[in-house]
Amino acid sequence: MEKLDIPQGTLDLMILTILAREPMHGYGISQRLAVLSRDHFHVNPGSLFPSLYRLEQDGKLKAEWRPTENNRRAKYYRLTASGRRQLEQHRERWNRVSFAVTSVLEGA
Amino acid sequence: MTVLHRIVSVLRWLIYRNSAERDLNDEVHAFLDMAAADKVRNGAPPGDARRLAILDLGGIEPTKERVRTYRYGALLDEITRDVRYAFRMCVKTPGFTFVVVLTLALGVGANTAIFSLIDALMLRWLPVANPQDLVQLKFRTPEARGPAAESFSYPIVGALADRTEIFSGVAGFSAFVFNVGAPGSIVRVPGAFVTGAYYETLGLNRAMGRLLARDDDQRGAPLVAVISDGWWARQFERAPEVVGQTILVNGVPVTIVGVSPRGFVGTNVGTIADMTLPVAALPSVSPEAAPLLGPGNFWLRVVARPAPGVSAAQATARLATVWPQIAEPLIAPHWSASRRKAMIEATFQLTPGGTGWTYLRTLYVRPLLLLMAVAVLVLLVASANVASLLLARASARQREIAVRLAIGASRGRVVRQLVIESGLLSLMGAAVAILLAWRSGRLLVSMIALGSSPVAFDLTPNVHILGFTSIVAIVTALVFGVVPALQATAVDPSPVLKDEMQTSSSRSRVLPSLVTAQVALSLVLLVGAGLFVRTLQNLHDVDPGFQPRGVLLVDLGARRSALPGVLLDEVRRVPGVVSASLSTHTPLSGSIWSEPAVPAGQPVPERDNAFFVGAGSRFFETMQIRLLAGREFRDQDGADRPAVAIVNQRFAERFFPGQTAVGQHLSATVRGQRRDLEIVGLVANTNAAGLRAAAPATVYVAYTQLSGDFPTTMEIRAGAPIGQVMSGVRQVLQPKLPSAPIEVRALSTQVDATIVQERMMATIAGGFGLLALAIACIGLYGLLAYSVARRTKEIGIRMALGAQRSRVMGLVLGRATRLVVIGIAIGLPAAWAVSRLVESMLFGLKPADPATIIGAVVLLAVAAQIAAYVPAWRAARVDPLAALRHE
């Protein structure tokens, strides 16, 4: 199947959404993203990690090393209160944007 | 918040850079492991799974690099942008930038200049091998007070050099000026006598030819010399044939055996040794100084290198055990038993020696540290001034800042921008400061060099100086930059955008308190400067008992016996010469002669109790020392006549209280010989031992009745312009005394040399005080001008309602007066406390000298009024109509 480019600025929103459910490591996020997007989006770790680091630096995420279910060690990210607020704002904005874009496209 | 987080993260990265790297590495590998495991589960061959996963990833290192770029690159980008923006701001407001950079340059430059001197004098390593291992030897006899003695006799240095279990090398050295060349073309070359192990101890071995070795420092060894690289270049244009060449030193042929490494000019910091000779050569080169090699003369400074594996503490301990065993034969046999015992019981001290030795250090440590503190105060004034300027500008930029905050810049981001701006200003200030300090360095050195010997310091900016200045500049930038930045951003954007004239009340308190602080600090500096200026003035006003103005001195060395008597008569005939005389010592030359002398019949004490001066005929007339009774020395007072003496008032009062001294007889020891002296005259006291010290009891003996070699100086009172007489005297003397260049100097220079320290303190502290005053006045002016500009509307309303111009002016001047009065109220007790610290350096006045304090306060008040007048006048010129329409 042809993979789609992730639209600018939406990766953060999707990461926050995925982490809102439960803390997860980088690989898990990329897998979950593929599953949830029905395999349309495949995020490369080269893009994923910078986003994760930025969100962590901005205080939206918090990371800690924990054992995985397979007894490996992995860095788990979880949402902070500030991250949760950002998720609310961005999700609301995204809804409006996509509604607006859809309206325009359908009205044309 | 986000910027704060980011700063924390960068700081964390700087501190835990390695662990951050490891963290990233672990995370990427964990990702790969999981991806590979999934691939295996989906049927990929286990051997290939990891490789495939890495392929998916696009390589491990590129991935990590992207994260790194993201993590730090963004921040660097932002900072670059901030710096560029800050630079544009500086260019856009050239006047503001100029004032700030100049203020900072003066403040930082004062510190850099003083630090350069401290660095050159005390901190710089000698250019030798492992200077940090070198120690300087000192000793202290049991009853001695004051600092430990630093000079050793030649036999002691030799004995210490033999203790190889303690030292791998011991070097003794002493500065000396050589007359080099054939008669008629003699030049004075500054140099040093050194002991044989000198270069070996310092670890210098690279040279053209060879350096001096232990064998050269033996009695009867061929006369050899090592010259400096600088002199080699200047005198011999780096000709390699110089090695082996013979030159005349004090008329004696000496062979040059080598050139010392470039950059090395001896171990006497501040003087240059262009030529070094072994001490053993001294009797041949300078016969009159031959006694220096004996055990009774302590004249060599000693630097040593402890043996390998021996610490300074161990060396001290071993020396303490060894010294009493070896001391006996090293001590002068003619010393009294008690003095010999004290020397045997002397203890040695080892201090770090890698920075060389200089008498200047003891002389200037305290003044320089004090001036450093003064410079820091000046910098504080400058910082406060710049802070207030930045604060005022931040208000002017309130709108810009509010816009930036409103469109989403975090406060931290704007603070960073403002701090970067002040950092840039500070750096520019520091750059100018280094330039200023470097340029003014020569001036500072010349102040020290007013003394008898020239001082050579290299004050070219080095790593120490650049490092020091950078730290000062960074700290300064933080001090003056952060507070205004925090103040400026502590605003709620919306009201500012709607209405310009909104000020947080806290800012209006910070600004005036900065000005008050400047006033208070300036007062402290002015009072300090005043105390030093008055000290110098008091020293100038001291009547030394002789008249130095118009007197020329010619040092004739120790050639008294060979001096033709007609020479003096010839000098007296030189046009413009009023009178001329000979003596062994001149007042305030730093060199003294003391002997025991008591009224005849009393036992002559063992210890010296009077200053002695050998004086020829017309000495008192030439020096204008008042003759109170009796007569001067005469040419007829020859060796075959009864020995005569002239005493000063202090001596007469002590030994002949209530009697007539003239006509009495003295029992004295003169150069080891018991003499009976008849007092033929009484003269006024002179401050021969220093302007600050009380006049010492002095006995003058007839120069013509002295036997043996004595140092001789000719005094000439000039009635014509000094330069003219100088060259006339030189023309007469030089052909008669061809073996050394005739140097004619002024007695007033010799007197001035004794107050070099005080002059330096008065000049620099005075300069810094005025600098601080000027900066504080600029600060006051700036504050008032700024507040007048801001209150134009209010002033307009007041005037529209009928306020008189004079009342408006009074309003502004009143505000200035209030600030200054508060500043003075804070500054006075501080000045009082600080001035007590310098009490010991003052002369003729107390720390709380009312005249100085009143003078400083008046000066400050007047300067402040002048600074306040312009803004006040401008306030009074406000046109009410224009002001009201303006908004």
Image (tube, coloured by chain):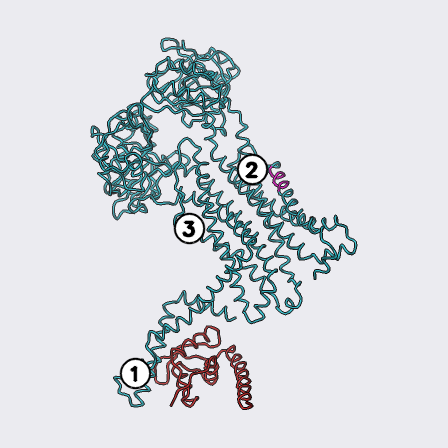
Chain colours: A red, B cyan
Q: Which amino acid does label 1 sit on?
A: Leu
Distance Cα–Cα, label 1 vs label 3: 54 Å
Chain to which the residue tagged by mark 1 belongs: B
Q: Position of residue B198 (x, y in %)?
A: 27, 38
Q: In which quarter of the image is the C terminus of chain B?
A: bottom right
Foreground residue among A40 and B298: A40
Q: Which label is found at residue B490?
A: none
Task: State whether residue B111 appears in this view.
Answer: yes
Q: What residue type is labelled 3?
A: Leu
Q: Which amino acid does label 2 sit on?
A: Leu
Name the secondary structure under disc 2.
Answer: helix
Distance Cα–Cα, label 2 vs label 1: 84 Å
Foreground residue among B732 and B342: B732
Residue B281 against residue B115 in the figure, above or below: above
Front of the two marks 3 and 2: 3
Q: What stretch is highlighted in magenta?
A: B852-859
